[in-house]
Every structure is written in structure tokens, then in C-alpha cells.
Amino acid sequence: MIGAGGHGGWDTYVSEARALVNVIEQELAVLGGMGSGGRDEKEVDVVRAEVEDLLDALDKLNKGMDADTLSHGERMQLERFEILHLDNKTELERTMKSVTARHKRERLLTDIHSSIQEYSTTQQLLEEEAEDIERAMRRVTDIYQEASASHAALLHNNTILSRISSRTRELAANVPVIHHVLNKIHQRTNRDQLILSSVVAFCLFVIWVFY
């Protein structure tokens, strides 16, 4: 224990104790502003450790004074610094709880924001996919309608050709001249096809032999 040792020893103690209390309170104010605005938790841990070291220094300084050698007024001052040590220690615990809670809230809000963004992106992709499917369905419907129209036109043309063919056969059966003309046309068509086939076959044979 260190006694007052005259005004010099006591004044030194008071000066150091006041300086420690001032720095502790400043660091606590800084610590209280953390936990928000993207402050890293490692920074919080650094400041917390500094405050704890300062509190330990103040506690050792207080315990180093011999209360029996102090006057009544000096003992009252010592008790005041001891109370300030306990109060600031309690304030550190309260501040750390508050900072930790703010960090948790910020992480939760960040997670919620990320989830909302992910949901919005997924929703947008689903809407785009639905639009693509709808466009594809419209194209399929258009193609089906065009195919139906073409099929109807082919059926109509086939009906007309069937009627023409039927009437032609009727005319050919009733009018021998027409029948004879049709036979001539058919024979000439067959002959032209035979000649064309012979020419193509001859050309292929020549190419195969000479080349």
C-alpha cells in the first residue's frame, strides 16, 4: 500500500486517477458509437480491450492507496474513484451488450435484404420465363392456324380436282374423240419419260466408262 506521503503523493494519485477516468469515459463514448454504420467487430474488440486495461489500471491505482493514512476528505475522494471504477465497469458491460445487439440487428437486416434481393431476382427470372412460354404458345397457335388453313385449302383443291377428273372421265367415256386424245397424251407422256430416262442412263454409262 502507498500512503498519501504528503501532498505530492496524493496529488499524483488524484492526477493519475482523474486522467484514467477521463480516458475511460472517452473510450466508452467511442465504444457506444460502434456496432452500426458497418463498423467491424474486431474494432469493437480492440476498444473493449483498451477500456478493460484502463479499468484494471484504475483498480490497481485505487488499491495501491493506504486508506488508513488518508484524511477524511482524501478517503472520500478515494471512495469516489472506486465508485467511478465500478460504474464504468458496469457501463462497459452495458455498452458491450448494446453494441452486440446492434451488430446482430445489422446482420439480420443484411440477411433479410439479401433474401429480398434473391427473391426479386428469382421472381424476375420466373416472369421472363413465363413471357417466353407465352410467346412460344402464341407462335404455336399461329402455326397451327396456318396449318389448318393450308389443310382446308388442300382439301378444297383436292375436291375440285376430283370433280374435274370425274367429269373428264365422264366426257371421255361419252365422247370417243376426247378419250382418244387423252390416250394419245398419256402415251406421249410415257414415251417422253422413256426417252429422257434412256438419255440419262446413257450419259451415266459414258461418264462411268470414260471417267
Image (spheres, grey):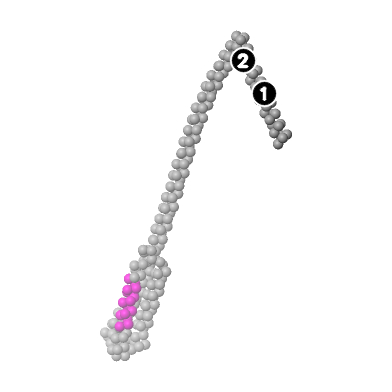
- Secondary structure, mark 2, is helix
Q: Residue at x 40, y 74 (%)?
A: 49
Give, as a single range, the part of the protein colored magenta.
15-29
Residue 128 as seen in the image, left or right of residue 189: left
Q: Residue at x 26, y 84 (%)?
A: 73
Indicate which disc, 1 or 2, sits on the residue closer to the N terminus.
Answer: 2
- What's under tag 1, amino acid-wise? Ile
- Using a 10 Å C-alpha cutoff, classify the residue at mark 2 as few (fewer than 14 neighbours), some (14 to 19) or many (20 or more): some
Residue 122, how many percent across, how many down?
A: 45, 49
Q: Quadrant of residue 167?
A: top right
* Residue at which label 2 appears: 182
Taking the magenta stretch, the answer to whether it contains residue 86 is no
Relative vertical location of residue 199 with respect to residue 116 in this rendering, above or below: above
Q: Quadrant of the C terminus?
A: top right
Residue 160 numbered mark, or none: none
Residue 46, how many percent across, how many down?
A: 40, 72
Residue 71 as seen in the image, left or right of residue 113: left
- What's under tag 2, amino acid-wise? Leu
In this rendering, the label closer to the viewer, 1 or 2: 1
* Residue at which label 1 appears: 195
Residue 16, how many percent across, how many down?
A: 32, 82
